[in-house]
Structures are given as structure tokens and as C-alpha cells.
Image: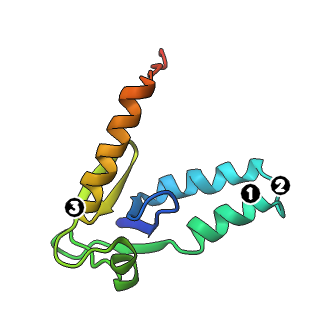
């Protein structure tokens, strides 16, 4: 599959994006959940039922569906934000506001990272 998968973020007012491989990893992770449990149903409803496979055109571009743009409040310009192994697409002002909130929380809580050793 030559493209990306996009879906509504369930934590922010933005669009989440990933590769098909990453989506398959997330789907595999749900195998550890109760098949008919509420958590599994919520994940399926929030992520997988909404996901769109968008293939790259000949120049490497995609067209983002209007309902995703409307959800994120994107009208003219979009801001692509790396998010580890995934990415997000934001309306710029909404991102800067959310980023400021996250920065303030991080300064209060001083998060730490643990790196895996090979």
C-alpha cells in the first residue's frame, strides 16, 4: 500500500495519520482486549471504523477528505506535526494553543524518557 491512513483524533481536534503497517500493529494490539469488551469496541469505533486509506498520486500527494478537514477546523492551510511513529495534521492556531498547554504541563510535571538498550 503506497499511501497513508488518516482518521479523526480522539484526543485532539486534529487528524491522525500513520502507515498501514502501524495501523496493523494497532489492530494486533487489540487482540489483547476482550473481543466484545467496551474498550475494544471504543477503539474500533474511534479509530478503525473511521480510518481512510489514501494513496499517493503520481507526485506523492494525497487529497484529505472534507469531513476530516472540517473535524480539524482546517480551511486554508494545514500544519503537519511529527508524532513519533505517526503524525498529526492540525489547523495551525489550534496546534500552537495545544502545544502551549502541553508545554506548561510538561514543565510542571517534568516527564522523563527511558531509552531501550539493544
Report, in whole angstroms, how far the alpha carbon at label 2 lies from the one at label 3: 38 Å
Q: Would you name the residue on which mark 2 appears?
A: 34
Q: Which mark is residue 92?
A: 3
Rate crowding at label 1 as few (under 14), some (14 to 19) or many (20 or more) other CA atoms within 10 Å: few
Report which residue position mark 1 lands on: 39
User: Dividing the picture into quarters, in which one does residue 105 lie?
Assistant: top left
Q: Earlier in the sequence, mark 2 or mark 3?
A: 2
Q: Marks 1/3: CA distance?
A: 31 Å
User: Residue 66: percent from the left, percent from the top?
Assistant: 34, 84
Q: Is residue 49 left or right of residue 60?
A: right
Closer to us: mark 1 or mark 3?
A: 3
Q: Are marks 1 and 2 in contact (CB under 8 Å)?
A: yes
Q: Residue at x 31, y 62 (%)?
A: 89
- Judging from the image, what secondary structure is the residue with disc 1 in? helix
Q: Is residue 30 above or below residue 104?
A: below
**Residue placed most toward the observer, 51 or 24:** 51
Q: Position of residue 60 (x, y in %)?
A: 20, 68
> Is residue 17 shown left or right of residue 35?
left
> Does residue 1 show up?
no
Of the image marks 1 and 2, the number of the one nearer the N terminus: 2
Task: Judge by depth and name the residue closer to the eye, 83 or 117.
Answer: 83
Amino acid at each position: 500500500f503506497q499511501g497513508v491512513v488518516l482518521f479523526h483524533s480522539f484526543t485532539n481536534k486534529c487528524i491522525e495519520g500513520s502507515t498501514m503497517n502501524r495501523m496493523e500493529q494497532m489492530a494486533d494490539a487489540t487482540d489483547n482486549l476482550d473481543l466484545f469488551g467496551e474498550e475494544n469496541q471504543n477503539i474500533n469505533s474511534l479509530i478503525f471504523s473511521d480510518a481512510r486509506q489514501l494513496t499517493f498520486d503520481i507526485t506523492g500527494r494525497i487529497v484529505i477528505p472534507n469531513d476530516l478537514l472540517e473535524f480539524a477546523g482546517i480551511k486554508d492551510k494545514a500544519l503537519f506535526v511529527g508524532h513519533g511513529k505517526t503524525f498529526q495534521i492540525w489547523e495551525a492556531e489550534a496546534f500552537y494553543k495545544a502545544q502551549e498547554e502541553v508545554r506548561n504541563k510538561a514543565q510542571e510535571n517534568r516527564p522523563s524518557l527511558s531509552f531501550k538498550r539493544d
